[in-house]
Amino acid sequence: MAAVLACGEGAVLSHGSAAALWELLRPIDGPVHVSIPTQQNRRSRRGIHLHRCPSLADLSSPPSSLPIRGGRGGQIVTRRHHIPVTTVQRTIDDLEGTVAPYLLRRARRQAELMGVRLKGEEGTRSRSDLEEDFLALCEHHPLPRPETNIKIGRWEVDFLWVEQRVVVETDSFAYHSGSVTFQNDRARDLDLRQRGFTVLRFSERQLEEEPSRVAADVARVLRLGVSS
């Protein structure tokens, strides 16, 4: 709020700072990002990154309090915790090209979990995205390409190396949250281990932020599991 007030009338929190306020991303180190109408000649202040936004100049009145489900159509600003801020949709738009791709993907997923329908994202994000990420990781490091979505008994596993009897499961909050899913995942792991499979489970964040460690762990288990 202090940063927004310091930038004068029409200023709103934006970009990574808005994403943190909406809880789309964890706070990012560095200056606070604030957008202002372009026609206003304001100097940058220490600790504040100014963005000049032409569309803010078209607003005839200060941002009003709008429900969180906003963010489509022409609305670009609102208030959250009484702080003027870009809407979720506008925040996502502003993040493109300004943060790492994995952070943009994470922000999009968090917005969808909040119930915000993003433009161009008509429910296309699914577990297949994690599958693509993991297969890309295998190709990059490189690891043998696993089979995908294979049934073992009553369970369908994400990735399987048949010869080494190794299974990898990839989890995202969207598809593995809740107590029922948690219990099912543990039942699946126990059943597979009793069938002689080694089960590795990695989170979406691990795939994005620690791909080298994930690859090293998989490679270690595959070497141990190679049949003679």
Image (cartoon, helix red, strand yellow):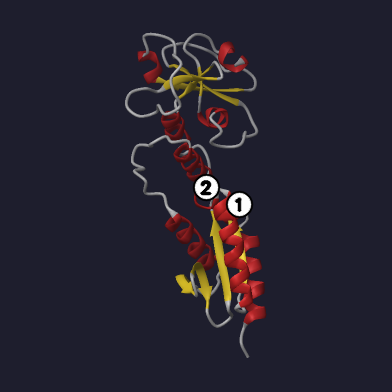
Q: Mark 1 points at which residue?
A: 209
Where does residue 158 sit, x and y in percent of width and height?
Answer: 50, 66
Q: First in sequence: mark 1 or mark 2? A: 2
Q: Residue at x 41, y 31 (%)?
A: 89
Cα distance, mark 1 to mark 2?
A: 8 Å
77 sits left or right of 46 in the view? left
Numbered marks: total: 2
Query: Relative to 179, is 108 on the left or the right?
Result: left
| Residue 73, picture quadrant | top left
x 44%, y 26%: residue: 87
Above or below: residue 16 compared with residue 226: above
Q: Does dot 1 land on a helix, a strand or a loop?
A: helix
Residue indicated by mark 2 = 102
Along the line of sight, the residue nearer the viewer: 39 or 170: 170
- The amino acid type, in three-letter code, at marker 2 is Tyr
Q: Residue at x 33, y 23 (%)?
A: 74
